[in-house]
Image (cartoon, coloured by chain):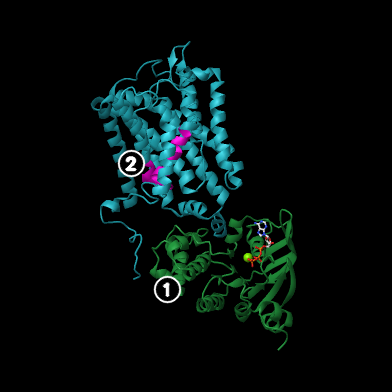
Amino acid sequence: MAPLLRRALFIGGTVVVLLVLSLVLPQTLDPVVFRIVMLSGIAIIMAVSLNLINGFTGQFSIGHAGFQALGAYGAAALTVYGHNALFGYLPKAGPLQPGLAGFFQGAPAILIAMLASGLLAAAVGYLVGLPSLRLRGDYLAIVTLGFGEIIRVVIENTDVVGGPRGFSGNVEAGVLTPRLTSFFWVYLVVVLVVVVSRNLRFSVQGLGFLAVREDEIAAQAMGVDTTRTKVIAFVLGAFFAGVAGALYAHYEFTLSPTSFGFVRSFDFVTMVVLGGLGSITGSVLAAVLLTALPEVLRSSLGSVQGLDQYRLVTYALLLIILMIVRPQGIFGRGELRRDTFFRRGKRPPATPLTGA
Amino acid sequence: MAPSSDRLVLEDLHVYYDAIHALRGVSLTVSPGEIVTLIGANGAGKSTLLRAISGLVRARSGRVAFGEADITRAPASVIVRRGVVHSPEGRRIFANMSVRENLELGAFSRNDKAGIARDMEHVLTLFPRLRERIGQNAGTLSGGEQQMLAIGRALLTRPKLLMLDEPSLGLAPNLEREIFRTVENINRESGVAVLLVEQNAHLALAVAHRGYVLETGRITLEGTARDLQSNPEVKKAYLGEEGAP
Ligand SMILES: Nc1ncnc2c1ncn2[C@@H]1O[C@H](COP(=O)(O)OP(=O)(O)OP(=O)(O)O)[C@@H](O)[C@H]1O
Ligand SMILES: [Mg+2]
């Protein structure tokens, strides 16, 4: 039962470490830094989940922020309008109780919110993905691009979630979106999405995902159900984007439909490509980099006007340079692994150049 | 690689690519344990025929059966699981994956761990060069090694009927012969039926038991390999000899 014990230790250890950090970090870190840590975590979930679609199976989804929007608005609407029925134990406004008490106070609500928004995004992902994933080539890009925009327009025209003004709760009833998202939940999902991706990557099933990316015809000829594989990747990616949305919604005071536009989707594509299509560790590092960099620039340069305006241009330039200098992504398509640093590991060395 | 009693039967198969009528009523059979070759000029429809059998393209009308099962409309992944396996034209190995991963993908549709390990060992014995390069990226293999990998990968599906589309394409003559000898050995040792598409009619007819000649989507000749070898028309068109001996 050694593997089971290892797994139990991993889960237990993760929970304890995250919980301790969750209690300590907000007290010790500079608020600006802590905010970067939180936003990075959410970006990691987005990038790693998009990597399942664009990196593993080689599809081109450019509407990932749309699924985050769906999750964010869905989750916030649930906790705000479901306050009386479901979450009466939460304060109508203001923070949760301090410390561990607050953690237990918020836990059921954020779990329900994450699950609900994940499932919502996954269901919509299935409906959006299935027809276009059956076809070949660029249909998915067009459809997901359109989907991202449609979601935004729908939100802007839906009054109960604030329309273009944004959503911070049911102001008349005095119920504001509860601040349920703590370090613990963000990084628990980070660990989850990384572990799911990693296990997939090194499983036979995952090999099928990569085969679809490499050569669809050959994958089919080897018995891989390519449509099913692409749909699974897409739905799984959408699920985690929805969960990231729930985390985002309960971290920020106010949701704005413009936070989830095409530009945001493009951010995530940039992260995945920059990190190296298919590389999980690459997606993680690129997500942190592209989240921290603008924040650091903003806080160090202070009030440089319109820094944000140039982000899209900067990213586009960054990508073009990358494509020329290092087309496999900064971190390559492989993984940074333990045995990159320590000489050990089950697999034989990846590339013996001389035959045995 | 189990011998089986399943016979492949095609009846009046028609395949279109939009307006192009690529197969115009093809009927053929491949019996268990047989090597059957399909020869024909460029564009005759040989690859299309294999694609139609393996479910990579859909027939508009006609019927494909393997043993008891009608597989005309079955998805490709199901057809592979029934033991009808297509190694497509141009090798199509997974270039950015290791040799091992390529072979593992051959076993994608199986879950008999012990059997997979046995077949893996068998393939690596058949192609020692693949064993030497097991961790290497498949894209770095030579053309001949890639062809061995393509065949090895197909063998790991545990085929009952193996369909090879131009396995000798682009290989030096001695390697070409080596590949054909291997195909013959696989057939003899494990009773796998083989449907072989080949430009090199000489070699194909030398290893095959029977053959079909395909011309613009129609079967125009069929017979034992020996009969086809001595057929004046085949000699003229496909064996590069002038007239009768
Ligand atoms: N995907 C496709 N779309 C449209 N037409 C196609 C397609 N594939 C093949 N064809 C056409 O169908 C006909 C048969 O092609 P096929 O590839 O089956 O020939 P082949 O006998 O395998 O030729 P070769 O020896 O050159 O490989 C050709 O006229 C070809 O142009
Ligand atoms: Mg062909």
Q: Quadrant of the C terminus of chain A?
A: bottom left
- The single residue placed furthest to the bottom in the displayed view is B245
- The single residue placed furthest to the top in the displayed view is A172
- The single residue placed furthest to the left in the displayed view is A28
Measuring from the top left, give residue A56's x and y in whole percent: 46, 48
- Magenta highlight on residue A308: no
Per the rendering, the mark at residue A335 is none
Q: Report which residue position mark 2 lands on.
A: A11
Determine the colour of chain A.
Answer: cyan
Tell which quarter ligand 2 is in. bottom right
Tell me whether marks 2 and 1 sit on the same chain: no
| Residue range corresponding to the magenta coloring | A264-284
Determine the colour of chain B.
Answer: green
Q: Report which residue position mark 1 lands on.
A: B128
Magenta part mainly helix, strand or loop?
A: helix
Nearer the observer: mark 2 or 1; the answer is 1
Q: Is residue A234 left or right of residue A347?
A: right
User: Badge 1 local density, few (<14 within 10 Å), some, or many (20+)?
Assistant: few
| Residue at image location 49% in from the left, 37% down from the top | A238
With respect to residue B244, does B216 lie above or below? above
Instruction: Tell me which amino acid carries mark 1.
Output: Pro
What is the chain identity of the residue bearing mark 2?
A
| Residue at image location 43% in from the left, 42% down from the top | A319
Q: Is residue B196 left or right of residue B111?
A: right
What is the chain identity of the residue bearing mark 1?
B
| Residue at image location 39% in from the left, 33% down from the top | A42
User: What secondary structure is found at the residue carrying circle 1?
Assistant: helix
Gap in angstroms between the C-alphas marked 2 and 1: 43 Å
Residue B85 occupies which quadrant of the picture? bottom right
Instruction: Tell me which amino acid carries mark 2.
Output: Ile
Measuring from the top left, give residue B223's x and y in whole percent: 71, 78
